[in-house]
Amino acid sequence: MLGESLTVRDLRICATPPGGEERIIVNDIGFALAPGEVLALIGESGSGKTTIALAMLGYARSGCRIAGGSVQLGDTDVLSLNPKETRALRGHRVAYIAQSAAAAFNPSRTLMDQVIEGALIHGVMSRQEARQKAVSLFHDLALPEPDHIGERYPHQVSGGQLQRVMAAMALITDPALVILDEPTTALDVTTQIEVLRAFKQVMRERGTTAIYVSHDLAVVAQMADQVLVLQNGETQEHNTTARILAQPAHAYTRSLLAAARPHEHLSPVRGRPGAELLDIDDLQVGYGARNAQGRPANVVLEHINLHLTSGQALGVIGESGSGKSTLARAVAGLVAPSHGAIQFDRRELSTTLRGRTPEQFRRIQMVFQSADNALNPAHSVQRLLNRPLETYFNLDRRARRARVEELMDLVKLPRHLLERKPGELSGGQKQRINLARALAARPDLILCDEVTSALDTVVGAAILELLVELRRELGVAYLFISHDISTVRSLCDDVMVLYQGQCVESGPCRQVLDTPQHDYTRRLIGSVPELRQGWLESRPPRSETAATMA
Amino acid sequence: MSEIQAMTHRRQSVPSRRDSHRRMTQSSRLPIATPARRNKPRLKLTRWIGLTLFGLWILIAIVGPWLAPYPMGAFVSDEIYGGASVAHWLGTDYMGRDMLSRILTGARYTVGLAVVAALLSSLVGAGFGMLAVLLPHWLEEGIRRIFDTLISIPSKMMALVMVSAFGASIPLLILAAVLSYAPGAFRIAHSLATNLATLEYVQVAKTRGEGRFYIAAVEILPNMIQSVLTDMGMRFVFIVLLLSGMSFLGLGVQPPAADLGSLVRENIGGLSDGALAVIAPALAIGTLTIGANLLIDSLSNSRDTQKE
């Protein structure tokens, strides 16, 4: 066993915002791990989980400081080390695996150089030994071509592979403790399952003690022995994983569990079919130079046919790169298709923005994934909601004001937020404003591009409920793009599965998701982690060639 | 109280930063980083120095001529290159004119010309920079090539050629400065706007059917205005130095008017004597540009900390 025990007592971390007073962001955190045990830190963003995890390295982010407590790793008191000893500890006895492998690698150096760098800096082994060790780790992590993958550069491997290479980088010095900071959050479910499996195997073989930071309870159920539920930097509940899943004691834990369980069908069952609203015929979108037949060099979407009646909700699912966002952008007029036609309300819809009428602009609204980028940070909420009213409707000042307040009520936000700028709102509030702006136009069709995926589970579930309610009250149609099958299931009537730019399956939501016909749909559905321990082990492993393809 | 808590308490109660021994041994125990706090007092100080110096020169540019004790061109003393005295605080120049009056009056040319030229450069540069992003691709390329061509011409050479071809006049000097410095402003604004234009709120505005000018002015500009202003401050400093250099060569502001650069040139003969008449206008140029620089630095720094 290589892992060592870890005991944390009374950890307190303070932060000083620029120009503000110092305040406590993590308070009274304590836990104990036996060698080889895995603790999950779970909570929504801002709950302090990464801050705590970083404290295990004796590190506090800029503007923060570790104000008290102790971190005991084996027989080392991590927080009382001097800088030189801390340097010797980091990347050697304690290793860190970050969320975004793409951002953690230097694009101009080979993977091998970066994987063995830590071992060489700490002088643990010679270059030759380190290379051998790395190759054996690549084997264990089920990477393709383990003997040669180290010669590649970061952009030459897929996201899931890069995440595993980063695990090799962390494990090369046989650390006593590994910190995994949301290592699979940025991955597709089909990739995530492979990465989780590889992580679990190498960690179990080496008996590594680990801290797993995540917001996803279903993932945590596969990986962790203990779970510590955090809210606002304080422990809400701390227990074994089995107990937390079976008998959550704290209300907050219960709400996390409720949000993570597959939602029941929230949507009203479709009544009579509405009028024809959107009709897409053999759409092809791509980029690059076109050949003689008018086919672009890189085709993102092909042979897409789609019908949407008014008030209908159609879910589009697929992994990243499947072309699902491109579909929404083509309907919105942001990318011009190279082939095919789009009809809106039985009238040909121009493929570019220039050819569209103001009425068409008004009736099709798009809601983007990241409310951070979708709301102009320089404008107040009032101004953001006002603009569509000015553009589309001929209203006087007072009527506009009344309408803005009505919209705030519709998305269940207090009116005093109107004067704020987006930077002063929480993630969930921003997404509600984002929706309200689309609703301001009184649209017939809302294109939702991953509207809940940037949000915490509890907040995301609330947004989803809002979407269902709006649909019931206003009768808007949704083209709902998501990689999350359970949100599609709870909101949509019909579903369309995209794989590598092609529609592999479509039909009523229940039918497709409960009795999937296509291999890929089955794999996609089977890869969604379930909220029970032992699920990961019960999934049949997939051959690496298929994983590379994905 | 645990060992660590006790230690941090001691650290917080350390009264002086100069108490280096205690501080070294204690702070090194804990990896604590509080850069924001450490930088704060220094930042405030540079901002105040910058603001005072720059504000002073703006004030002089506005009211200087009325404060001047003597008319600018009046021969008031028999002594040339006179030192500081009660009658002439900054001494007299090579023709026995009052130096203080000449600086108070001449500052208007230096500051005024530079402010106008910097404003125009940024207006032209940032305006085209933002619009280029929203124009069709071929037009954007065309605009970029034109500005790239201009940027490749050394600014002083362009100004010299223009003055020798058309003669020195104030509109021409401004034109030369704008032609020299607008391309740089364009490059910076264009790269900022390129990043902003791909953001989703701009896409939202496009799918709302908004026009180019609305998107540029309302969606993009407010998010880059601070960087554009910082850049304009830098252009101001460059233009002051360009115009002063031109005047020093005798190709800038022409007599009887004189800006700070020409004051240095006129009195260059007094350099060997260390005459105040040459040191004072040189110091004036120095304090003006240093003040502007400090102010820009502190403004852009404070913006960075706000962002964090």
Image: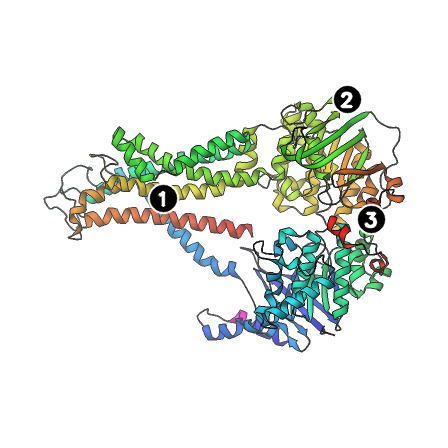
| Eye-nearest disc, 1 or 2 | 2
- Whether the residues at callouts 3 and 1 have beta carbons within 8 Å, the answer is no
Q: Give x and y (percent) for residue B165.
A: 26, 30
Badge 1 and badge 2 both on one subunit: no
Residue A76 located within the stretch drawn in magenta:
no
Q: Give x and y (percent) for residue B134.
A: 55, 32
Residue A448, quarter of the rendered image: top right
Q: Give x and y (percent) for residue B136.
A: 55, 29
Q: Is residue B137 above or below residue A162?
A: above
Host chain of mark 3: A
Host chain of mark 2: A
Q: Nearer the viewer, residue B42 or A122?
A: A122
Residue at numbered disc 1: B237
The mark found on residue B119 in the picture is none
Circle 1: element type: helix
Q: Residue furthest bottom?
A: A75
Does A137 sit left or right of B256 as displayed? Answer: right
**For the N terminus of chain B, which image quadrant?**
bottom right
Residue at image position (34%, 47%) is B289
Three-letter residue code for mark 1: Val
Circle 3: element type: helix
Q: Nearer the viewer, residue B44 or A494?
A: A494
Q: Which residues are magenta?
A: B10-16
Residue at numbered disc 2: A346
| Number of residues whose C-alpha sits closer than 10 Å to that of mark 2, classed few (under 14), some (14–19) or many (20 or more) | few
Q: Marks 1 and 2, how far apart in space? A: 61 Å
Three-letter residue code for mark 3: Arg
Badge 3 and badge 2 both on one subunit: yes
Can residue B100 be seen by looking at this rendering?
Answer: no
Residue at numbered disc 3: A523
Can residue A333 be seen by looking at this rendering?
Answer: yes
Q: Nearer the viewer, residue A183 or A453?
A: A183
